[in-house]
Image: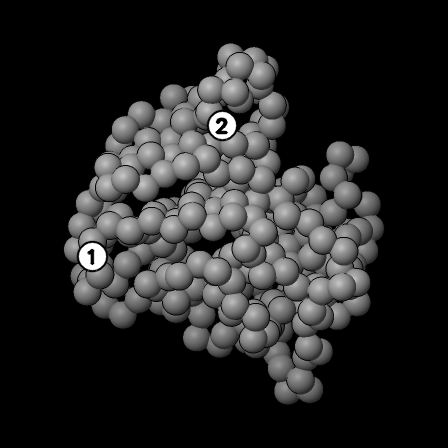
């Protein structure tokens, strides 16, 4: 998994839990169904079957791939509109090319993120670069939709290109997990993404048998999505595996532990941790695709 890696011995370590901290319990675990998006690239609908109240301020998320394309197979989307929310495209492995009607765009590759604020309305297209179409190769990423409060629904569209090397890199107390903070604040360490809606967007690689315990804002919701591998979440060690989403209750910390045995083609359990402050009067903050 080429998303930015580092020697955890030389990274800032998360601080240990305070004696009074509580772990967020698991409320429910759902398994995302598989489908196809755009011109036919495979996705896992990570939020399928989950109520909007439990997701707020998030709206939708697809795990794109993981797929190994043969030459000529890669697919993208046609031009399509968005309004009233932000799209976050995070490429873990492979390449995707973005263009939009306000001049934003570029190639997203290996740990990079493109953050598009649709605001008052925008057209965009996502396609595999010509070299990927010609050669084939691995395609694996995430697209997340983040709702905007009513006051920002008609904001001027904007665009952020965040290279993988810009992510804030941390490690767990024992050095067994690599933590990439793309947006938000984890233990006083802030990611590069600028968000209108306060959120955390974190990709964590957990070595077999290791665990990570992250401090989490009490007024944020908390979602744990397993990109690959298997392990447990929360104080009761609820089992989770690839393609599953755990929705957590209230508390101060999120704890995830990787099983000792992982998939043969993966050296670690790969997890996406998401959370945000619910939007007041969400009923007046509708989203338009």
Mark 1–mark 2 CB contact (< 8 Å): no
Residue that mark 2 sits on: 42
In what element is the residue under mark 1?
loop
Residue 150 visible, this angle: yes
Count the numbered circles shown.
2
Q: Residue 215's spot in the image, x, y percent?
A: 59, 73
Q: Residue 130's spot in the image, x, y percent?
A: 47, 20
**Distance between mark 1 and mark 2 Cα atoms:** 32 Å
Q: Is residue 211 left or right of residue 40?
A: right
Within the image, what quadrant is residue 261 found in?
top right
Q: Which mark is residue 129?
A: none
The residue at 41%/37% (across/down) is: 106
Residue that mark 1 sits on: 155
The residue at 28%/40% (across/down) is: 103
In what element is the residue under mark 2?
strand
Q: Is residue 262 left or right of residue 26?
A: right
Dot 2, crowdedness within 10 Å: few (<14), some or many (≥20)? many
Q: Residue 131's spot in the image, x, y percent?
A: 52, 20
């Amino acid at each position: 998994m080429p998303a930015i890696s580092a020697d955890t011995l030389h990274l800032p370590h998360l601080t240990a839990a305070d004696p009074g901290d509580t772990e967020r319990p698991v409320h429910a675990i759902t398994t995302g169904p598989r489908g196809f998006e755009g011109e036919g690239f495979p996705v896992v609908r990570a939020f399928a079957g989950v109520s909007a109240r439990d997701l707020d301020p998030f709206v939708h998320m697809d795990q794109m791939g993981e797929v190994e394309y043969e030459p000529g197979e890669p697919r993208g989307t046609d031009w399509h509109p968005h309004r009233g929310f932000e799209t976050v495209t995070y490429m873990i492995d492979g390449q995707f090319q973005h263009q939009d009607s306000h001049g934003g765009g570029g190639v997203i590759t290996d740990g990079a993120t493109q953050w598009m604020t649709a605001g008052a309305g925008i057209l965009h297209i996502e396609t595999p670069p010509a070299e990927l179409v010609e050669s084939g190769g691995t395609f694996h990423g995430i697209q997340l939709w983040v709702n905007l409060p009513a006051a920002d629904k008609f904001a001027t569209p904007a665009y952020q290109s965040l290279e993988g090397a810009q992510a804030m890199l941390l490690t767990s107390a024992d050095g067994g997990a690599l933590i990439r903070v793309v947006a938000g604040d984890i233990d006083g360490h802030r990611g590069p993404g600028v968000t209108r809606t306060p959120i955390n967007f974190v990709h964590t690689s957990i070595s077999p048998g290791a665990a990570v315990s992250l401090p989490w804002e009490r007024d944020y919701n908390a979602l744990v999505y397993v990109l690959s591998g298997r392990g447990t979440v929360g104080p009761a060690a609820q089992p989770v595996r690839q393609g599953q989403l755990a929705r957590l209750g209230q508390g101060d910390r999120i704890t995830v532990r990787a099983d000792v045995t992982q998939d043969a083609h993966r050296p670690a359990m790969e997890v996406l941790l998401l959370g945000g402050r619910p939007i007041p009067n969400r009923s007046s903050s509708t989203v338009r695709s």
